Image (tube, rainbow, N blue to C red):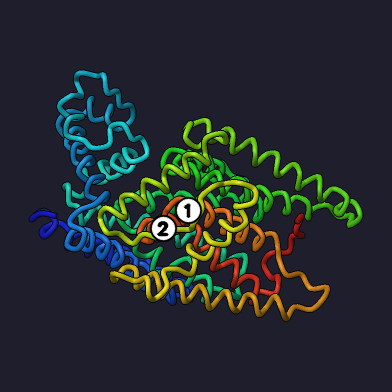
């Protein structure tokens, strides 16, 4: 942070506030905007500012500043040397002698995922005068845009659950804090939420448009570049939801029942081949190497946590064998949603995670109570809630096994949390409204 932040950041905050206020004023008759928009909007900006301050004053640095440092090189090149600036932005060749003076000042020239964050920030820096705080505000607003779209889309499906959906999409501490800064998690959450909304608008609401297909392609591409495991988990579970929707369009009930397992099998096959195609972009995440990648990542994070005194946790044996996987699934689910426990808290951020874990424990209790009380013949799970829980369990297993550090886990799990929370509320309170399709499971 520098004197530029002191001069420029208040100006950008004022602009952000005026945009939100004008938007709310124009839509003053919209009760949804009046009740949720401005509060959630300002809350997200506050999350971004808090994120920057904690990493600057408490951690004395971190990935967010490394991303920003590289972004300054890119934005400087775009201003003073546009040709090489565009090379850094779109096609970076480390053997290009013209780029040497730029590449020697950068941290992530060999890491395309991290470089994509710096490239995004580099473009934004052009408009924020290289102010870290101002660029963070822009990232937090983009993050809010993704969450707001998700909130509105789910609200159309479950119009009686806006209050509950707002908790899952707009107000969860992990979402507000970890997806508001210049980080991979911010970009991934935005891309995942827009991807889901585009799929729902196309398949569920039948809005077939070029823009929706472009959004799907672009967001899937972003996730493939930045964090490929997210799109792998998502593809494997959203396909079941999509086929449930198309299966429900068959008018004949006997025929619908007959083709249901066929739809399910096709969904599994397509998700498998989608995973194969996606993983080809990164050999580490190929189906042959993914378990080794997970174990090596977990080992690395564990070692770093122990060396620097971080918030380390262990799930015991990490062997991905058929006999050990069920235990790992349960352990990873518990650590992802309910830990750290009170006796595992060592800093303020862990305390917030602990409080969030208590909230997840409470809504899980409501969920189990609902399951126990359901009447025979009632539909417990809809295709939407099935997707939410399959995605949450799959994602929790992946990040829970890999992280081995509560701080890392708090960041990694953020894209999945809205679906977990909204899936629970859609199960216990909606009584099937908003999701009339029949489950193929």
The image quarter containing residue 104 is top left
| Outermost residue to the right | 254
Task: Give percent across and percent down for residue 98.
Answer: 19, 20
Q: Residues within 10 Å of mark 1 (few under 14, many from 20)?
A: many
| Outermost residue to the left | 3
Mark sitting on residue 423 = none
Q: Give me the residue at 62% from left, 50% from top.
A: 238
Mark sitting on residue 399 = 1
Mark sitting on residue 409 = 2
Viewer-closest of 312 and 407: 312
Query: Helix, strand or loop at disc 1?
Result: helix
In space, the residues marked 2 and 1 are separated at their CA atoms by: 7 Å
**Sequence-first tag of 2 and 1:** 1
Q: Give me the residue at 76% from left, 55% from top.
A: 440
Query: Helix, strand or loop at disc 2?
Result: helix
Residue 92's place in the image compared with 312, above or below, is above
> Would residue 237 appear left or right of 379 to someone viewing this image?
left
The image quarter containing residue 143 is bottom left
Q: Give me the residue at 61% from left, 37% from top.
A: 274
**Discs 2, 1 touching: Cβ within 8 Å:** yes
The image quarter containing residue 427 is bottom right
Task: Give percent across and percent down for residue 211.
Answer: 52, 44
Task: Give percent across and percent down for residue 95.
Answer: 26, 19
């Amino acid at each position: 942070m520098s004197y530029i932040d002191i001069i420029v950041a208040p100006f950008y905050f004022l602009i952000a506030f005026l945009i939100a206020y004008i938007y709310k004023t124009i839509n003053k008759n919209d009760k949804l905007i009046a009740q949720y928009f401005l509060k959630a909007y300002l809350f997200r900006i506050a999350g971004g500012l808090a994120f920057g301050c904690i990493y600057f004053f408490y951690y004395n640095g971190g990935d967010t500043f490394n991303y920003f440092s590289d972004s300054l090189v890119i934005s400087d090149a775009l201003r003073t040397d546009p040709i090489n600036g565009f090379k850094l932005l779109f096609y970076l060749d480390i053997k290009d002698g013209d780029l040497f003076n730029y590449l020697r000042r950068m941290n992530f020239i060999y890491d395309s995922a991290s470089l994509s964050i710096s490239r995004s920030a580099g473009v934004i820096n052009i408009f924020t005068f290289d102010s870290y705080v101002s660029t963070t505000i822009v990232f937090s607003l983009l993050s809010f845009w993704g969450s707001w779209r998700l909130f509105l889309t789910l609200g159309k499906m479950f119009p009686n659950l806006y209050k509950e959906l707002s908790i899952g999409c707009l107000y969860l501490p992990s979402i507000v804090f970890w997806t508001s800064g210049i980080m991979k998690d911010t970009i991934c959450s935005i891309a995942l939420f827009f991807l889901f909304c585009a799929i729902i608008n196309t398949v569920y609401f039948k809005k077939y448009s070029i823009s929706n297909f472009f959004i799907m392609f672009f967001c899937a591409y972003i996730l493939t570049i930045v964090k490929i495991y997210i799109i792998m988990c998502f593809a494997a579970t959203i396909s079941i939801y999509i086929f449930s929707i198309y299966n429900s369009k068959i008018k004949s009930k006997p025929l619908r029942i007959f083709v249901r397992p066929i739809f399910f099998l096709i969904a599994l096959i397509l998700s498998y081949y989608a995973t194969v195609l996606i993983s080809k972009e990164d050999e580490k995440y190929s189906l042959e190497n993914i378990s080794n990648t997970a174990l090596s990542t977990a080992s690395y994070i564990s070692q770093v946590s122990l060396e620097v005194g971080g918030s380390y946790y262990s799930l015991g044996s990490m062997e991905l064998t058929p006999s050990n996987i069920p235990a790992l699934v349960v352990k990873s689910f518990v650590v992802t949603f309910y830990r750290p426990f009170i006796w595992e808290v060592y800093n303020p951020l862990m305390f917030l995670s602990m409080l969030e874990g208590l909230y997840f424990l409470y809504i899980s209790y409501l969920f189990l109570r609902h399951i126990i009380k359901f009447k025979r013949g009632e539909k417990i799970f809809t295709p939407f809630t099935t997707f939410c829980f399959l995605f949450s369990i799959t994602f929790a297993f992946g990040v829970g096994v890999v992280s081995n550090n509560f701080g890392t886990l708090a960041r990694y799990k953020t894209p999945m949390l809205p679906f977990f929370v909204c899936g629970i509320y859609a199960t216990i309170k909606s009584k099937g409204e908003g999701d009339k399709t029949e489950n193929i499971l």
